[in-house]
Amino acid sequence: MKPKTISAEEFDRMFDDGEDISEYLDFSTVRRPGLEAKRVNVDFPGDVVTKLDRAAKRRGVSRQALIKMWIVEHLDNEGKLGTAA
């Protein structure tokens, strides 16, 4: 669906007045700087992959999702350790 068009001046006025401008935006081209996915390849021994698969199955998620969750949790906890007094 193509967004409606208006003049830049009208768009600016609507934005400044706090009006909803979403119908004039093309969300199909939106990017979130700094949040783009970047591919990382990691090799694990077979027994580690087996353990990861079992842990992922218990949680009902994919191996990749489990690895992502654990890494984020670890990084979040590491940040908390640095702020402890």
Image (tube, rainbow, N blue to C red):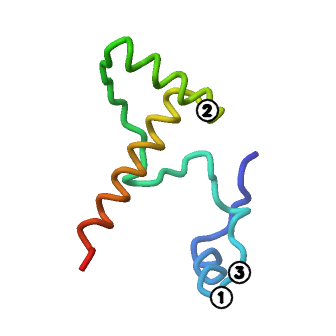
**How far apart are the two marked residues, 3 and 1, measured between alpha carbons?**
6 Å
- Tell me which amino acid carries mark 2: Val
Callout 2 secondary element: loop
User: Residue 17's mark?
Assistant: 1
> Is residue 25 found left or right of 33 in the rendered image?
right
Residue identifier under label 2: 61
Outermost residue on the top side: it is 46
Neighbourhood count class around disc 3 (C-alpha, 10 Å): few under 14, some 14–19, many 20 upward: few
Callout 3 secondary element: loop
Residue identifier under label 3: 19
Residue 33 sits in which quadrant? bottom left
**How far apart are the two marked residues, 1 and 2, measured between alpha carbons?**
45 Å
Of the pair 24 and 83, the residue shown nearer to us: 83
Percent across and percent down for residue 81 are 28, 65
Residue that appears at 59% across and 85% down: 16
Neighbourhood count class around disc 1 (C-alpha, 10 Å): few under 14, some 14–19, many 20 upward: few
Percent across and percent down for residue 14 are 66, 81
Residue 20 sits in which quadrant? bottom right
CB atoms of marks 3 and 2 within 8 Å: no
Question: Mark 3 vs mark 2: which is more N-terminal?
Answer: 3
CB atoms of marks 1 and 2 within 8 Å: no
Question: Mark 1 vs mark 2: which is more N-terminal?
Answer: 1
Percent across and percent down for residue 49 are 42, 18
Callout 1 secondary element: loop
CB atoms of marks 3 and 1 within 8 Å: yes
In the image, which is nearer the foreground, mark 1 or mark 2?
2
Residue that appears at 46% across and 22% down: 51
Residue 44, placed above or below residue 16: above
Residue 68, placed above or below residue 73: above
- Tell me which amino acid carries mark 3: Glu
